[in-house]
Amino acid sequence: MFGGLFSKSQDQNKNRIPPGQRLTNGFPIMTYGTTPQVTTEEWQFKVWGLAKEITLSWSDLMALPQHDFTIDFHCVTTWSKLDVQWTGVKVLDFMKLVELDPKAAHVLQHCYGGYTTNIALDDFLLEQNFFAHTLQGKPLPVDNGGPLRLVVPHLYAWKSAKWINGLEFLEQEKLGFWERNGYHRRGEPFAEERYSN
Ligand SMILES: Nc1nc2c(c(=O)[nH]1)N[C@H]1C(S)=C(S)[C@@H](COP(=O)(O)O)O[C@H]1N2
Ligand SMILES: [Mo]
């Protein structure tokens, strides 16, 4: 009986692991370039492009509703991690502060350190996407993107920008760092959208 239950839960986990991925127990750090050190006092977040320009402080962000999230995280280098626990602010709550131009269809995420990654507006404006400042109950470590990163659970983890500090709204897609360097413009792991053609 317990054996049956066990293999059932193993099976369910299997369905959660996209093709070509394997489970990892640790939390591998994946950073291109140097790790920016930013205090919450100096931290600023800007919105521009096809949206009314705004600049937010850390306290503006913390004043928004806070939620816990448990998500699976898939890196294109083939590791996946199940049930990662975060706390932060839903993208949809954040976006109540943003006055979007109806022509906006794409977003370029900008970061301290210069990393960028693009995402279609439809992939960005989802209930499940969030800005995280806490990982497994502790302030988000700087190596994992602290003080703040985006988390987009349904796309490969390179779309979850660490040290995010800006959103540029665009009519036409503008490719980010990895997308200009051979990775897929969308990056959906169950469709194995790893590389551009
Ligand atoms: N700013 C920035 N964000 C980034 C990256 C990066 O190099 N710089 N790497 C991406 C990649 S490839 C992955 S897999 C995840 C890794 O997050 P972790 O280091 O917290 O595991 O962050 C993504 N976000
Ligand atoms: Mo990655």
Image: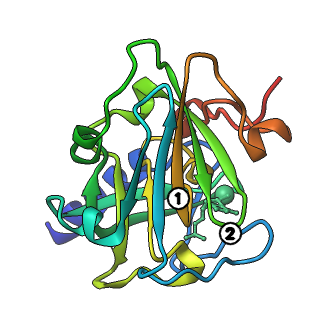
The numbered mark at residue 54 is: none
In the image, is the residue at mark 2 within 8 Å of ligand 1 by its beta carbon?
yes
Q: Secondary structure at mark 1?
A: strand
Residue topped by disc 1: 165
- The N terminus - image quarter: bottom left
Q: Earlier in the sequence, mark 2 or mark 1?
A: 2
Position of residue 110 measured from the top left corner of the image (x, y, whole percent): 61, 51
Q: Is residue 62 left or right of residue 197?
A: left
Residue at 55% from the left image edge and 80% from the top image edge: 38
The C terminus lies in quadrant: top right
Residue 90 vs residue 197, the one in the foreground: 90
For the rendered model, the colour scheme is: rainbow
Q: CA distance from mark 2 to mark 1?
A: 18 Å
Question: Considering only vertical position in the picture, is 149 above or below 136?
Answer: above
Residue 98 in which image quadrant: top left
Q: Amino acid at mark 2?
A: Met
User: Which residue does the numbered mark 2 point to in the structure image?
Assistant: 30
* 83 or 15: nearer the viewer: 83
Which residue shows up at 70% across the image and 56% down it?
115
Residue 161 relative to residue 114: left or right: left
The amino acid type of the residue labelled 1 equals Asn
